[in-house]
Amino acid sequence: MIKIYAPASIGNINVGFDILGAAIYPIDKSLLGDCITIKKSKQFTLKTIGQFSHELPTDITENIVWKCWLYFCKKIKKDISVSIILEKNMPIGSGLGSSACSVVATLVGLNNFLNHPINDNELLILMGKLESLISGTIHYDNVAPCYLGGIQLIINEKKYITQKIPHCNDWFWIIAWPGININTMESRNLLPKKYTKKICIDHSRHIASFIHASHTMQYDLAAQVMKDVIAEPYRTILMPQFNNIKQKIMNIGAMSFGISGSGPSIFAICDNINIAIKIEKKINEEYIVNKNGFVKICKIDNIGTKIIG
Ligand SMILES: Nc1ncnc2c1ncn2[C@@H]1O[C@H](COP(=O)(O)OP(=O)(O)OP(=O)(O)O)[C@@H](O)[C@H]1O
Ligand SMILES: N[C@@H](CCO)C(=O)O
């Protein structure tokens, strides 16, 4: 038997659409990620439990975990008889990398259970492929940090799929899911097919400055250039409260604020716990729309996916 935990992640982190992502854990030590348990069995079975399991497709062949098992069997050219339990702790369509948690936990679980028939790089490529079955295109900005931890820069060149970049240990990442869902594919379809020269230059300037600032530990500069000119201007149509809450959170003292992944979750950054608590309170009062929604003060999860049983 093996049990795997895969953490939530923030895709894009404003400045790197599809090419930057951060794995996170709540400082209150609550579980923000999916768990997968794998046991030997006479035939394949998949059971789902957990707070958000009722949101999953009822047909198990529609569950991404089933597809992971199928693709893994194809990859190693062997039918594997296992029973899998998915503990779905992550809301679906939240912008916190929910499908990535299931994909990464399942593939890491199967690979460990079978003594590593697939190497790390091939496993990551398989994760990207499985994630693309859901969102329509390959983007590693959730699966890479979820798997490997930290802030990951997606390179996607042959054997260089992703690399970890340095981050500020003092930063708090306050994340909030309002309690409603946005489909990633729909949210991607809202974006323009082409961007102006000015947007391209601004985007390159921001991302280059962010990577430079991260490596030279100029964290104020890193936060200052965490701006989203690619997705935020088009996606806020799905998030009517976004601009209002952004203004208020920046006024409290956030160093950056934006959409987590494809939304509707949001995130704010600050380097002071008292400001983080004030931000948490304000978001709770003004952005959470029902009892399912939540706000959590988080830090960067440097480990990523791990064996917990
Ligand atoms: N184990 C699973 N976890 C999450 N979604 C799943 C899973 N299995 C199947 N799905 C389906 O995949 C789709 C996920 O949609 P979507 O990409 O919007 O969510 P997401 O991956 O949770 O988003 P995000 O990465 O923004 O958190 C839904 O249609 C959902 O029913
Ligand atoms: N980079 C992806 C992340 C989806 O979670 C997007 O913004 O569409």
Image (cartoon, rainbow, N blue to C red):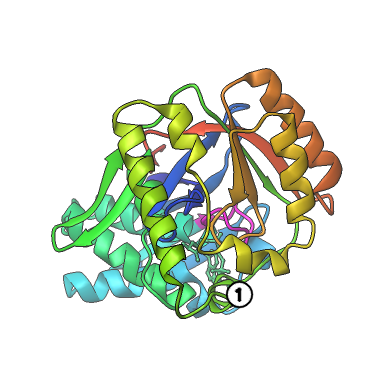
Q: Percent x, y for residue 2?
A: 36, 46
In the rendered view, would you say 259 is above or below 41? above
Q: Is residue 94 magenta?
A: yes
In the rendered view, would you say 169 is above or below 24? above
Density class for disc 1 (Cα within 10 Å; few <14, some 14-19, many ≥20) is few
Which of these two is toward me, 300 or 101? 300
Answer left or right for 173 relative to 73. right
- Point 22% across, 55% down: residue: 114
- Point 68% across, 63% down: residue: 236
| Stretch of the chain drawn in magenta | 86-97
Q: Percent x, y for residue 9?
A: 49, 48
Which secondary structure lies at badge 1?
loop
Answer left or right for 135 relative to 180. left
Q: Percent x, y for residue 100?
A: 45, 59
In the rendered view, would you say 155 is above or below 192? above
Q: Percent x, y for residue 218?
A: 39, 27
- The residue where tag 1 is placed is 57
- Point 19% across, 51% down: residue: 115
Which of these two is toward me, 148 or 174? 174
Ligand 1 within 8 Å of the CB at mark 1 = yes
Answer left or right for 257 relative to 294. left
- Point 39% across, 31% down: residue: 167
Instruction: Tell me if residue 141 can be seen.
Output: no
Q: Main secondary structure of the magenta part?
A: loop
Instruction: Tell me if residue 264 can be seen.
Output: yes
Which of these two is toward me, 159 or 75? 159
Which quadrant of the picture is home to ligand 1?
A: bottom right
